[in-house]
Image: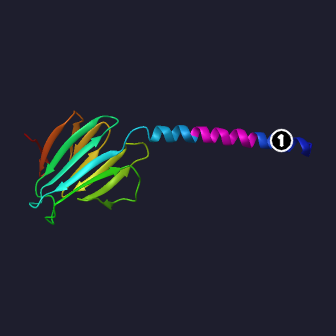
């Protein structure tokens, strides 16, 4: 094959491949971030009662308020908001408890928190507290005592 005709063909293949790669990359990235991340507000009072408020704005999940009596050990009063929007090596500490698993490839993703002895798993289809799966259904308040869920009044 003639060397003069090979380079333009290779350059054309390279440009088409690069354009295809960039188009697919931007499409996947837009799908990955089209929903908002989990937004969790952590609060603790002097008695050690912990309150988590979970919401996800774009899918209109929550707010769900979960109260865990005597889950905090240090008695420090705090209120902190955490967005689960960027991957980190897990487990990692949260203001109260720790994040033991997070798959944030496609937001909102899956996040599992361990607060005291209770595991709280946030999925787009359901909220799991301990071994209890609850469908997302608007605003509600829950109290968890020894992994038993009660509706707060």
Location of the C terminus by quadrant is top left
Q: Decide whether the magenta segment is chiefly helix, strand or loop.
A: helix
The residue depicted at 37 percent of the width and 44 percent of the height is: 109
Q: How many numbered callouts?
A: 1
Q: Secondary structure at mark 1?
A: helix
Q: Is residue 67 left or right of residue 122?
A: left
Q: Position of residue 98 (x, y in %)?
A: 28, 59
The answer to which image quadrant residue 107 occupies is top left
Q: Is 3 colored magenta in this rendering?
A: no
For disc 1, the neighbor class at 10 Å (few under 14, some 14 to 19, many from 20) is few
Colour scheme in use: rainbow
The residue depicted at 32 percent of the width and 49 percent of the height is: 111
The answer to which image quadrant residue 74 occupies is bottom left
Vertical order, 97 against 134 (above or below): below
Vertical order, 60 against 77 (above or below): above
Q: Residue furthest bottom?
A: 74
Q: Position of residue 124 (x, y in %)?
A: 32, 38
Q: Position of residue 120 (x, y in %)?
A: 24, 49
The answer to which image quadrant residue 93 occupies is bottom left
Vertical order, 19 against 98 (above or below): above
Q: Is 14 colored magenta in this rendering?
A: yes
Q: Residue furthest top?
A: 137
**Residue beneath label 1, please?**
8
The residue depicted at 36 percent of the width and 59 percent of the height is: 90
Q: Which residues are magenta?
A: 13-24
């Amino acid at each position: 094959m003639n060397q003069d005709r090979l380079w333009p063909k290779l350059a054309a293949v390279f440009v088409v491949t690069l354009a295809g790669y960039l188009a697919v990359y931007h499409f996947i990235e837009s799908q990955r971030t089209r929903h908002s991340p989990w937004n969790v507000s952590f609060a603790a009072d002097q008695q050690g009662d912990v309150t988590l408020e979970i919401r996800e704005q774009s899918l209109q999940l929550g707010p769900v308020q979960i109260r865990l009596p005597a889950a905090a050990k240090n008695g420090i009063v705090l209120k902190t908001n955490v967005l689960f929007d960027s991957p980190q090596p897990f487990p990692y500490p949260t203001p109260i408890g720790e994040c033991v698993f997070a798959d944030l490839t496609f937001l909102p993703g899956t996040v599992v928190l361990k607060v005291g002895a209770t595991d709280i798993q946030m999925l787009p289809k359901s909220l799991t507290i301990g071994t209890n799966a609850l469908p997302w259904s608007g605003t509600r308040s829950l109290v968890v005592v020894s992994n038993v869920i009660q509706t707060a009044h």
